[in-house]
C-alpha cells in the first residue's frame, strides 16, 4: 500500500483559558478548522477562542535560498 500525503493543515489559535490567561499562537494540526477546534477544546476545556487562522505552509525548495519577501514575512511574525 502506498502511503498517502498528509492532508492536515496547521491552525494558529489565540485563546482565553477558563482562568483568564490569554494564549497566543497555539498551533494545532487538523483536517479542517472544525477538527482543529475539536482538538483544542479537548485540551483546553471551557476556553474562549479569540482568533483562528490557517498557517500557510512554508516553501520548501532544497538548495534555493528564501526570497527577500519570505524573510520579511518570517521576521514580522
Image: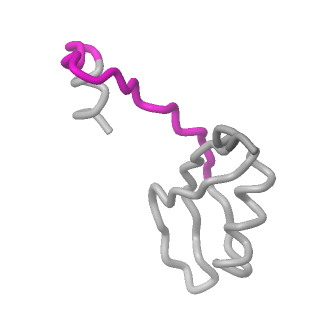
Q: Magenta residues?
A: 51-69
Q: Main secondary structure of the magenta part?
A: loop
Q: Nearer the viewer, residue 31 or 34?
A: 31
In the image, is residue 24 above or below residue 45? above
- The answer to which quarter of the image holds residue 47 is bottom right
Position in image of residue 10 (x %, y %): 57, 46
Q: Which quadrant: the N terminus?
A: top right
Say if the magenta span includes residue 39.
no
In the image, is residue 36 above or below residue 66? below
- The answer to which quarter of the image holds residue 59 is top left
Q: Which quadrant: the C terminus?
A: top left
In the image, is residue 70 above or below residue 40? above
- The answer to which quarter of the image holds residue 72 is top left
Position in image of residue 18 (x %, y %): 64, 82
User: Residue furthest toward the bottom?
Assistant: 19
Q: Is residue 72 left or right of residue 13?
A: left
Position in image of residue 6 (x %, y %): 64, 42
Q: Is residue 68 left or right of residue 24?
A: left
- The residue sitting at 49% across, 69% down in the picture is 22
- The residue sitting at 74% across, 47% down in the picture is 31
- Number of marks in picture: 0
Amino acid at each position: 500500500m502506498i502511503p498517502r500525503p498528509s492532508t492536515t493543515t496547521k491552525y494558529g489559535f489565540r485563546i482565553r483559558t477558563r482562568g483568564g490567561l490569554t494564549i497566543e499562537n497555539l498551533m494545532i494540526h487538523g483536517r479542517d478548522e472544525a477538527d482543529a477546534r475539536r482538538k483544542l477544546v479537548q485540551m483546553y476545556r471551557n476556553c474562549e477562542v479569540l482568533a483562528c487562522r490557517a498557517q500557510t505552509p512554508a516553501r520548501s525548495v532544497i538548495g534555493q535560498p528564501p526570497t527577500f519577501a519570505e524573510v520579511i514575512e518570517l521576521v514580522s511574525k
